[in-house]
Image: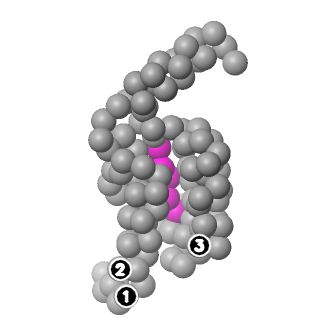
Amino acid sequence: MTFWKKHWQRGLLLREVQMFNQEHLDKIDRRYFNVIMADDTDVTIQSRNTGHYWYLHCAGYPTEEALVIFHKHKYQHPYHQHGRARTLRQAVKNIQGHDKWQMGGRKNNS
């Protein structure tokens, strides 16, 4: 690890910025989500229920909603910002709520 990255990460930890650790990542339900990529700042998952893609990014600054949630319906589509969350757990609950709404008879305007 480079000198600057080590000090940057240490600074984030001292400011108590939420970054994903292995404990957080292990709590993602692999039966519900296909985990495409996961590291200490970014998680990309696909809902097995809707097929939608979700990109979760820890913005790296200490605010109440430092996790940004991006969403797309199909692989070829671009992401759009869906919302924010304080924790990975809160983001996952948000996604599951969106899935429930999506599968519950949403009218298709296409």
Q: Quadrant of the N terminus?
A: top right
- In the image, what residue occupies the spot 51% across and 77% down? 50
- The Cα–Cα distance between marks 1 and 3, rounded to whole angstroms, is 17 Å
- In the image, what residue occupies the spot 57% across and 50% down? 24
Q: Which stretch is magenta?
A: 53-57
The answer to whether residue 78 is visible is no
Q: Residues within 10 Å of mark 2 (few under 14, many from 20)?
A: few
Instruction: Name the mark nearer the viewer: 1 or 3.
Output: 3
- Above or below 11: residue 30: below
* Mark 3 lies on residue: 32
Q: Quadrant of the C terminus?
A: bottom left
Regarding mark 2 in the picture, which secondary structure is present there?
helix
Instruction: Name the mark nearer the viewer: 2 or 3.
Output: 3
Locate residue 49: give its quadrant: bottom right
Regarding mark 3 in the picture, which secondary structure is present there?
loop
- Above or below 91: residue 103: below
Three-letter code, disc 3: Tyr
N-terminal of the pair, mark 1 or mark 3, is: 3
In this rendering, position of residue 105 left or right of residue 9: left
N-terminal of the pair, mark 2 or mark 3, is: 3
Q: Position of residue 60 (x, y in %)?
A: 43, 31
Q: Nearer the viewer, residue 63 or 45?
A: 63
Three-letter code, disc 2: Trp
* Mark 1 lies on residue: 104
Three-letter code, disc 1: Gly
* Mark 2 lies on residue: 101
- In the image, what residue occupies the spot 42% across and 65% down? 93
- The Cα–Cα distance between marks 2 and 1, rounded to whole angstroms, is 5 Å
Q: Nearer the viewer, residue 84 or 107?
A: 84
The answer to whether residue 105 is visible is yes
